[in-house]
Amino acid sequence: MDFVSIRDLRTRSAAIWESLAEAKDLVVTSNGKPVAVLSAATPSTLDATLAALRQARAQLAVINMQRRAQEAGLDQWSLEEVNAEINEARRQRRK
């Protein structure tokens, strides 16, 4: 994976766009920390590329929710405990 700083993106944009065509993905950094990913796309692949990125984000969100639930011990709840929690949340929402 290739990395490019925000400063380089501003000052060497033509060279960066060329390298993006070859690398397909570049990680954009600010103060050495990743802040974004540039991913190559064409008019014919744009919709599929965006759909794939959104699907990957959704999968990561589910994985993170599962990890947090496991860390909190919520993965050990019985079905009755889960349903009680859902019912309580619904009751609170009606107020």
Image: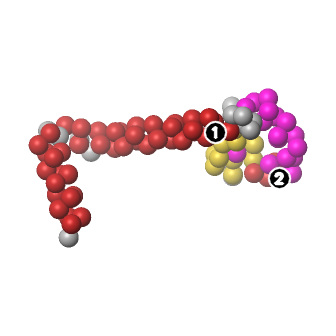
Q: From the top left corner, tell me how far across and down residue 77 is, in percent.
A: 17, 40
Residue located farthest toward the bottom when viewing the structure as drawn: 95
> What's the amino acid at mark 1?
Asp
Quadrant (top left, top right, bottom left, bottom right) of the N terminus: top right
Query: Which residue corresponds to the image point at 86% horizontal and 51% vertical from the top-left?
Result: 11
The residue wearing badge 2 is: 10
Q: Which mark is residue 11?
A: none
Q: Is residue 94 magenta?
A: no
Query: Which residue corresponds to the image point at 79% horizontal and 29% vertical from the top-left?
Result: 22
- Over which residues does the magenta segment extend? 9-28
Viewer-nearest of discs 2 and 1: 1
Q: In the drawing, does residue 61 fall left or right of residue 5?
A: left
Q: From the top left corner, tell me how far across and down residue 53 is, in percent.
A: 57, 39
Q: Nearer the viewer, residue 42 or 5?
A: 42
The residue wearing badge 1 is: 47
* Mark 2 to mark 1 CA distance (whole Å): 27 Å
